[in-house]
Structure formats: structure tokens, C-alpha cells
Amino acid sequence: MGASVRRVVTGHNDEGRAVILFDGPTPNRLEFSVPDLASMVPWLTSGAIDHVSDWDPAAAGNTIPSFPAAGETIVRVADFPPDTAYPKDARSLIFGEIHGSDDAAAGSDHAAEKHFWFHRTDSLDYAVVLDGEITLVVDEGEATLQAGDVVVQRATSHAWSNRTDKIARVLFVLIGTPPLSAADIAMQRKTADRTLEQA
């Protein structure tokens, strides 16, 4: 597994002064049966954002959902090993380990045969490549990304393909959005186009 991620979390003391609550390696780490595939969750929110308590939602041992529900957020750092490190049954193995079978099924409509990582979630995801190189694959196209590149992933079917021989590290900020299927999005786009044509 790659190097740990230092997590610094701020808060307030009883006098309302800013303090450092936590400073150290991210305690919530998930390792998979695929060597070097791992994720660390420095923080998450569910429901109202809490600026008052010292509770740590991402403490070691806390159960972290794979993807956020509407109104929730997850910050995740993921290490992706080279594609050659995955076994032949990678799709069922990985999504079984993260309880993401529904997300894998939702992303497989158009391009599942292109890559085993294909999935789709109801979320707006900001992804920042921290180290290495990784290719974002979508139904119709792909983009190869280097350290410093940013992806805004808007509830699309997608996969992450590491075609190099080194681990790629990506920071994700996942923001859960209300459920809206790709078919619903297509229908709403067509309705909007007809409305514009009639205007």
C-alpha cells in the first residue's frame, strides 16, 4: 500500500478559539484483496454539518459508505495499482468488497466491456490526481490525467484505468446528489432542447 495520508482537522475549544483537533495519519483505511488497491477517508459528512462537537466520523473502525447519499459528502484518497495487478474477476471482486454492485450495474449500460472499473453513482465528484498517471474512461471517450489535473465527474458512467507500471493516487471529494438515472438525464436534455427550439 502507498504512503499514509496526513490528516489535520480543526475545531473549536470551549472559548470559541480555533484548535487543531486531529493531526496524524488518516485512521480510516480500507485495503482490498488486490495488492496496492486502497482507500483512505479523512472526513465525511451526513446530515447537518457539525462544527460544534469533537466527534470524528472518519475514526478507525467507523463504517464508511462507498458512495455518499444525497446531501452527504466523502473525502477519499485512493491508490490505483496498474491494471495488470487485477485478477480476471476484478469487477465482481472489487464491487463485492465495496458493496457497490448496484453502482457497477448502473454504469455498465454502454461500456462495461471497456474496463472492469465501470460504475455510476448519483454524485458530483471532484477528482484531483496527486501522483502518477490515470485514464478516465467514459462511455464515449477518455482522458489521460497527470498529477495536478482535476476532473469534475457529474454522475456519469466511468472507470479509472491505470495503464502504467506505478501506483496512481487520486483525491476525491464526493458530493451525493438526488437520484437521477442516465436515461432521466437524457430525457430531460431532450425536453430542454425541444423547449429551446419552440422559444
Image (cartoon, rainbow, N blue to C red):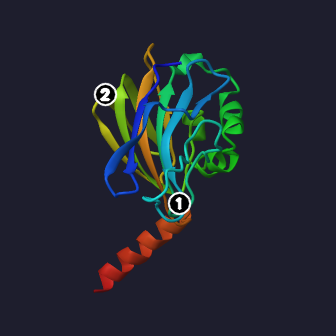
Name the quarter where the N terminus is drawn. top right
Question: Residue 187, position in %: x, y?
Answer: 49, 71
- The residue where tag 2 is placed is 146
Quadrant in which the C terminus appears: bottom left
Q: Residue at x 58, y 17 (%)?
A: 85
In what element is the residue under mark 1? helix
Q: Give the residue displayed 53% in from the left and 60% down from the top.
A: 182
Task: Say which amino acid is labelled 2.
Answer: Gln
Spot occupied by residue 80 in the image (x, y as percentages of width and height): 50, 26
Report the front residue among 137 and 167: 167
**In the displayed structure, does residue 23 sit left or right of residue 120?**
left
Extreme top residue here? 165
Alpha-carbon span between mark 1 and mark 2: 28 Å
Q: Nearer the viewer, residue 34 or 30?
A: 30
Residue 137, how many percent across, how many down? 45, 38
Instruction: Reply above or below: 174 against 96.
Output: below
- Mark 1 neighbour density, 10 Å: few (under 14) some (14–19) many (20 or more): some
Foreground: 89 or 94? 94
Q: Quadrant of residue 84?
A: top right
Vertical arrangement, residue 84 with respect to residue 152, above or below:
above
